Image (tube, rainbow, N blue to C red):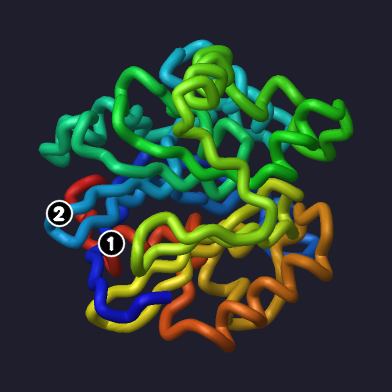
C-alpha cells in the first residue's frame, strides 16, 4: 500500500436492525436482541470520493422483505432509521457522478442492495467473486438466495460488467493508491474488507466482525459460515493494521463523525 495517500472515513447510517445475541457472538446462548448498525462509508482525500457498501435495496418492498426475516427472532419492526443511498448522498452533499468507486463488503442486500449503475455513472464496483459465485451456484448458506442482490442491483451488475466497471476480486485488489479491497470469507464466502490509509494510520473496515466485542474478545460472530475463517480474519487484521473497525458497531457513528444520524 502506498503510504503517501491520506483519506478521511465517514460513517453514514443506512439502517438499524436488531439481531439475536447468539448470532452476534459465537458460543453465547443469548436470545435477546442487539442493535446492529448498517452504514454506507464515505472515503475521501479531498479529490477522490469512494464508498464502502451501498446500503439497503432502493425498492422499499425488497428491503421490508429482508427485515421480515427478523420475525423469527421476535422482532416485528425490522429495519429502523432507514436511509437509502440516494438520501445519504444528498444529505452528505455528494453528487453521484463524483463517486469514483464502491467497495461492497458483503454480497447480501444489507450491503449490496443500493448498487445502482445509473446513480453512480463513473464509479467502479468491487465485490468478492466468491460471493457472486455462491449466489449463482444456489449453494447459499444464509440468508436465502433472494436476499443476495436486489432486482435492480442485479440488473446494474450486468450494466457495470458491460461498461467495464465491475471488478470481481479473487483475493485482493488495489482500488486506488492507499485503498485496498481484501476478500476474507468467514461470515460468507463473499465477505470482504476495505483497507484505508488515513492520517491516523491504516484502518481496516472488517465485515466479518460485527461489534467491537468480537475484536476485543477474539470471539467471532455466531452466524459465520466458517468460524475458523472469521477468527483468522480478525487476528490478521488486528496484527497488520492500526485500527480495525467492526462493521456494525453502533460506536462507529461517534468514532467516524456521524452523530447527527442517531
Residue at the spot 86% in from the left edge and 29% down from the top edge: 137
Residue at the spot 26% in from the left edge and 39% down from the top edge: 99
Residue 66 at x, y = what percent?
61, 25
The residue sitting at the bottom extreme is: 239
Residue 138 sits in which quadrant? top right
Q: Which mark is residue 100?
A: none
Between 149 and 260, the residue placed more toward the observer is 149
Q: Nearer the viewer, mark 1 or mark 2?
A: 2
Instruction: Reply above or below: 23 against 254.
Output: above
The local secondary structure at tag 2 comes to loop
Residue 122 at x, y = what percent?
30, 31
Marks 1/2: CA–CA distance: 13 Å
Between 175 and 144, the residue placed more toward the observer is 175
Q: Quadrant of the N terminus?
A: bottom left
Residue 82 appears in the figure: yes
Residue 64 appears in the figure: no
Instruction: Reply above or below: 7 against 41.
Output: below
Residue 236 sits in which quadrant? bottom right
Instruction: Reply above or below: 46 against 190.
Output: below
On screen, residue 121 versus residue 75, left or right, reads left
Q: Residues within 10 Å of mark 1 (few under 14, many from 20)?
A: many
The local secondary structure at tag 1 comes to strand
Which residue lies under the disc numbered 2? 47
Residue 161 at x, y = what percent?
54, 26
On screen, residue 207 versus residue 175, left or right, reads right
Residue at the spot 67% in from the left edge and 72% down from the top edge: 233
Residue 241 at x, y = what percent?
48, 82
On screen, residue 125 versus residue 106, left or right, reads left
Which residue lies under the disc numbered 1? 9
- For the image shown, how many numbered marks are present on the structure? 2
Tell whether label 2 touches label 1 (CB within 8 Å). no
Q: Residues within 10 Å of mark 2 (few under 14, many from 20)?
A: few
Amino acid at each position: 500500500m502506498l503510504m503517501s495517500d491520506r483519506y478521511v472515513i465517514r460513517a453514514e447510517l443506512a439502517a438499524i436492525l436488531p439481531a439475536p445475541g447468539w448470532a452476534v457472538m459465537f458460543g453465547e446462548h443469548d436470545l435477546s436482541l442487539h442493535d446492529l448498525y448498517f452504514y454506507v462509508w464515505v472515503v475521501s482525500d479531498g479529490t477522490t470520493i469512494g464508498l464502502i457498501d451501498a446500503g439497503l435495496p432502493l425498492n422499499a418492498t425488497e428491503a421490508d422483505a429482508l427485515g421480515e426475516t427478523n420475525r423469527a427472532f421476535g422482532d416485528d419492526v425490522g429495519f429502523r432509521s432507514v436511509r437509502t443511498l440516494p438520501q445519504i448522498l444528498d444529505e452528505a452533499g455528494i453528487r453521484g457522478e463524483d463517486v469514483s468507486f464502491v467497495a461492497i463488503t458483503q454480497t447480501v442486500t444489507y450491503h449490496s442492495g443500493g448498487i445502482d449503475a445509473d446513480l453512480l455513472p463513473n464509479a467502479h464496483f468491487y465485490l468478492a467473486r466468491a460471493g457472486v459465485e455462491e449466489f449463482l451456484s444456489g449453494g447459499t448458506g444464509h440468508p436465502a438466495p433472494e436476499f443476495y442482490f436486489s432486482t435492480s442491483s442485479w440488473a446494474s451488475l450486468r450494466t457495470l460488467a458491460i461498461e467495464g466497471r465491475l471488478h470481481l476480486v479473487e483475493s485482493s485488489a488495489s482500488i486506488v493508491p492507499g485503498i485496498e479491497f481484501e476478500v476474507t470469507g468467514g461470515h460468507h464466502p463473499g465477505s470482504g474488507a476495505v483497507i484505508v490509509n488515513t492520517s491516523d494510520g491504516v484502518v481496516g473496515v472488517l465485515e466479518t466482525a460485527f461489534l467491537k466485542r468480537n475484536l476485543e474478545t477474539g470471539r467471532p460472530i455466531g452466524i459465520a459460515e466458517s468460524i475458523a475463517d472469521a477468527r483468522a480474519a480478525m487476528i490478521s487484521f488486528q496484527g497488520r493494521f492500526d485500527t480495525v473497525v467492526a462493521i456494525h458497531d453502533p460506536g462507529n457513528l461517534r468514532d467516524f463523525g456521524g452523530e447527527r444520524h442517531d
